[in-house]
Amino acid sequence: MAIIQEISEYLQKGRAKNVKALVQQALDEGIDPKEILNKGLLNGMMIIGGKFKRNEIFVPEVLVAARAMNAGITILKPKLVEVGNEPIGRVVIGTVEGDLHDIGKNLVGMMLQGAGFEVIDLGVDVKPEVFIEKAEDENADIICMSALLTTTMTNMQNVIDMLKDQNLRNKYIIMVGGAPVNESFAQEIGADYYTPDAASAAETAKDAVLK
Ligand code: B1M
């Protein structure tokens, strides 16, 4: 579909305004929001990721592409998120300390909202004590942590260790994810669940609280 391809291409060029307009146009044309997300926005960001890895582009280009991605997601959000009246649970979510990547975390937050959770987004570069303070203040059921760097994923462990030190570990369901994270790492650090993408994170969270 031409418009989906255009969304991917404008995202790669970092043209946030065009991405926004095209995402709106695609929605108006009745294209499935998930297709716009997966084949347009995420496809564009995957291509950017490959170029970044091969040193064909650098941080500024990636940053503008990420802004365009977030602009597109903002338009899609109301379509992907249909919130019911009573939340099925409360989630605090953030990207771990030292890590500024927020696109995946934002998607997970959106899907959780769509699944009926109240989502408290702590943002990026979240210190372990902030995850815990906010989870306590907000009476959360789940703590969700995202990491995109091999150097920051280890900070997930700090949150779990701090919870254990404060005898709070069993009070919360801990979910982790992000590109470098996998099942065995999640088990190693003592998290409850690892999920590879935003949709499965929402499903798993729902199963976990309704269990
Ligand atoms: Co960065 N970066 N980056 N970057 N960046 C990566 C992650 C990298 C793999 C690129 C590469 O070299 N190929 C590499 C990491 C290498 C490594 O650690 N092994 C990297 C690097 C090195 C860096 C810097 C160090 C670069 C530098 O400064 N020299 C720097 C670090 C800054 C910091 O965080 N301290 C940096 C900076 C940046 C930008 C700021 C320019 C920008 C981020 C902008 C933003 O987020 N607002 C950026 C971007 C955009 C990327 C890539 C290109 C794309 C990431 C992304 O948004 N993907 C990335 C390359 C790549 O991933 N291929 C890269 C789309 C997003 C939807 O996917 O976040 O994986 P993702 O989320 C997925 C799943 O992982 C999952 O759900 C989502 C899909 O549904 N998921 C969860 C995520 N969190 C979850 C939580 C869950 C469950 C599932 O449960 C709680």
Image (cartoon, rainbow, N blue to C red):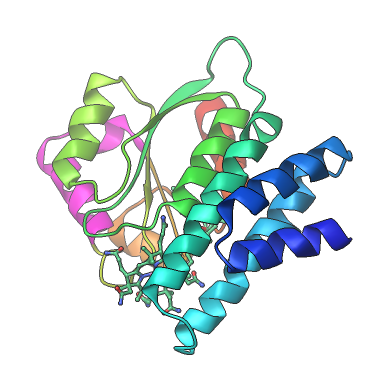
Q: Position of residue 32 (x, y in %)?
A: 83, 43
Q: Position of residue 158 (x, y in %)?
A: 18, 54
Instruction: Give the image quadrant in which the ligand numbered 1 is located.
Output: bottom left
Q: Position of residue 187 (x, y in %)?
A: 38, 60
Name the quarter where the C terminus is drawn: top right
**Is 143 or 111 nearer to us in this picture?**
111
Which residue lies at the image location 11% right of the left edge and 36% below the top edge? 166
Which residue lies at the image location 24% right of the left edge and 38% below the top edge? 131
Name the quarter where the N terminus is drawn: bottom right
Q: Is residue 128 magenta?
A: no
**Residue lying farthest to the left in this orientation:** 165
**Is 160 or 211 nearer to us in this picture?**
160
Which residue lies at the image location 62% right of the left edge and 30% below the top edge? 114
Which residue lies at the image location 46% right of the left edge and 69% below the top edge? 62
What secondary structure is the magenta-colored segment mainly? Answer: helix
**Residue lying farthest to the top in this orientation:** 85
In the picture shown, does residue 161 fall above or below 79?
Answer: below
Res 85 → quadrant: top right
In the picture shown, does residue 53 fall above or below 137?
Answer: below
Answer yes or no: is residue 139 visible. Answer: yes
Q: Position of residue 208 (x, y in %)?
A: 52, 35
Q: Which residues are magenta?
A: 155-173
Answer yes or no: is residue 168 visible. Answer: no
In the picture shown, does residue 8 fall above or below 68?
Answer: below
Q: Is residue 163 magenta?
A: yes
**Is 120 or 144 nearer to us in this picture?**
120
